[in-house]
Image: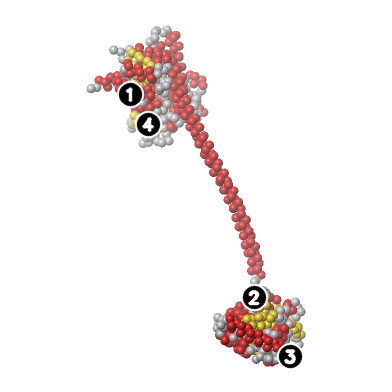
Amino acid sequence: MKRKILVIEDNEQNLYLIRFILEDGGYEVLSAKDGREGVEMAATRLPDLILLDIQLPDMDGYTTARALRENADLNRTPIVAVTSYAMPGDREKALASGFSGYIEKPIDPDTFEAQVSQYIAAKNRQRSRP
Amino acid sequence: MINNKNPDCYRRFMFWCCVGLLVSLFFNIPSARAANRIVTVGVYENAPKIFMSESGKPAGIFVDVIEHIARNEAWHIRYVPGTWIEGLNRLAKGEIDLMPDVAYTAGRAQSYSFHKVPVLSSWFQVYACKGSNIKSILDLRGKRITVLEHSVQEEAFSNLATGFDLFATLIPTPDYKNIFELVASGKADAAITNRFYGVMHAQRYGLEDTKVVFHPTLLFFAASQNTPQQLLDTIDNHILNLKSDPESAYYGSLKRWTSEEVPFKLPGWIKTLGWVMGVVLFMSIFGSIFLKHQVNERTHELRKINQEMEQRIVQRTAELATAMEKAQTADRIKSSFLATMSHELRTPLNSIIGFTGLILRERAGPLNDEQKKQLKMVQNSSRHLLALINDILDISKIEAGQLQLVYDNIDLCQMIDKVVQSTQPLADDKGLELGVDISPDVGTMVGDARRTEQILLNLLSNAIKFTETGSVRIICESDESRVAFKVADTGIGIKDDDIKTIFDSFRQVDSAISRKYEGTGLGLTISRKLVELMGGNVWVTSVWGAGSTFGFCLPKERTET
């Protein structure tokens, strides 16, 4: 069964790029254009991994991450920030808001898939524990 | 006692009887002080014994004595002013009861009554202008001498002159009042007065006492012949008492009227000094008043200035607060601008770099060689653009003070390995030897790993970029407090003129070279700023055509800068 990855990203080109790379890598890609839609979709589809942009309209990535973490079903789902935010404290702020990791934009097509698979593997290791 | 033939005396007697009767009806007065009797006393000018004071009241030693007695005997004293001669005449006529300061002579005893105890003893003395050089009575020969008319001294001097067979012109004067003035104005050569008057007045007229002293006299109150003996006895009793007590009013009066004014002539220089001191004192007082005025004025000015300053400070503080608020707002705007720019610039680059990479990997389909070549160019340009954006953002952040260092323990060997590994392919491409020389005691340091790596990577890639043949070496050594990194190459080197500005922004040496060696020209600037931010410093040594060595050192422990 294909792993499901939810991509919450408002930029169409970037979404297309990520979707292309991940689908090419054999993942099922779900997508949402904003935080609210993302939280709803995550609740119904229970993805294996969520890639979340920080700068989103209305509800930003940090708020979205906290909303996702409120859902008990998504408690262990890795949420990875994919962002071009590079100001001091961004990484720390992201981790404090419930993100599991941080991939800086622009993404590198050669390494992106490998980075994503690492997070899924880490989650599986956790799950396999008694 | 009472001369019935004298109607005046009779009338007076009757009067006294009536008065005494009336008073004794109202007051229970002891009979010893039978009556509140009125005693009339003549007054003439013979200071300090008897005279009219400036305020028009009788004064002098005799007045003090008779007043003392009057107080004790409840007498009422009525004074009758006049000249000496007038006084004597009145006394002879019985118009007054007492005439003060009369020397006893046998002749006078015929006309007047005397009590027994003298009030004063005196003598006569000749007074003359200063420098008159009168040393004995013989020096008075031919002189004009003024003397009180019908006085004892007139008579005594006449006798004396006769005795010495000397002729002098006597100028009688009715009163002491003008006696010295006659001498002072040159109308007489000398004056004879009693010593009391002389002591008191000679100085004032510029006269001095001569050595000519004569005729000691005893001075009494002379009484009219119809004055009751009881009154004279009372006077005697009192004078005896007064004289026996050194604290009495009598001695007080003597002291008061006869204490000689000590003529003290100041030497000229003291006068001058006095003047000078006076002038100095005046000037200093004036000066101090002037200064005080000035100080007050200045104080006022200063206070005013102070107030103005305070107001200005308050105003400036308010302005500063506003300016600070503005600056802080500007800072926040700048900060948010940087974040936004960072995001906005990277987002399109994200897809450019991403899709170019995808297409080049032929995931979307096969490419021909020309397409690959051109897409490679797109990829390089976009990577360069990304590097530029990153560098500019770094510089902006450093300059805005917004770059925050993340301190951690750094394993230096591990970090250098990582940097070498990432640049190895570049060196290999150019056939350069990439050497690492880490001294064994280097160990770890506390610093920002990501930023230290960034600096090393920058220096190493620069070295590789500017070296065509030979080697690039990375050297790391440390002492107790610092770690030094050096990157030495055998490249083109830097000219002396350029070394000074090598670390400035956009200072890639030689624009032709810069075209050949792609770069942002910001790497060294960022490296320098980062090193300084971490409390270290950078340096470079180079020989043109032979190679360069870039170095930096960092403190081993975190330092607050």
| Residue B407 badge | 4
Q: Chain of mark 4?
A: B
Q: Which residue is mark 1?
A: A70
Kind of element beneath mark 1: helix
Q: Earlier in the sequence, mark 3 or mark 2?
A: 3
Q: Chain of mark 1?
A: A
Q: CA distance from mark 4 to mark 1?
A: 32 Å
Q: How is the image coloured?
A: secondary structure
Viewed as shown, does residue B364 lie left or right of B115? left
The percent coordinates of residue B404 (x first, y second) are 41, 30
Q: Is residue A81 above or below residue B302?
A: above
Q: Nearer the viewer, residue B553 or B61?
A: B61
Identity, as a three-letter code, of the amino acid under mark 3: Thr
Kind of element beneath mark 4: loop
The percent coordinates of residue B435 (x first, y second) are 37, 24
Q: Is residue B296 above or below residue B449?
A: below
Task: Report crowding for label 2: few under 14, some 14 to 19, many 20 or more residues within 10 A (C-alpha).
Answer: few
Q: Earlier in the sequence, mark 3 or mark 4?
A: 3
Q: Earlier in the sequence, mark 4 or mark 2?
A: 2
Q: Name the quadrant containing residue B202.
A: bottom right
Identity, as a three-letter code, of the amino acid under mark 2: Pro
Identity, as a three-letter code, of the amino acid under mark 4: Tyr
Kind of element beneath mark 3: helix
Residue drawn at 24 percent across, 22 percent down: A129
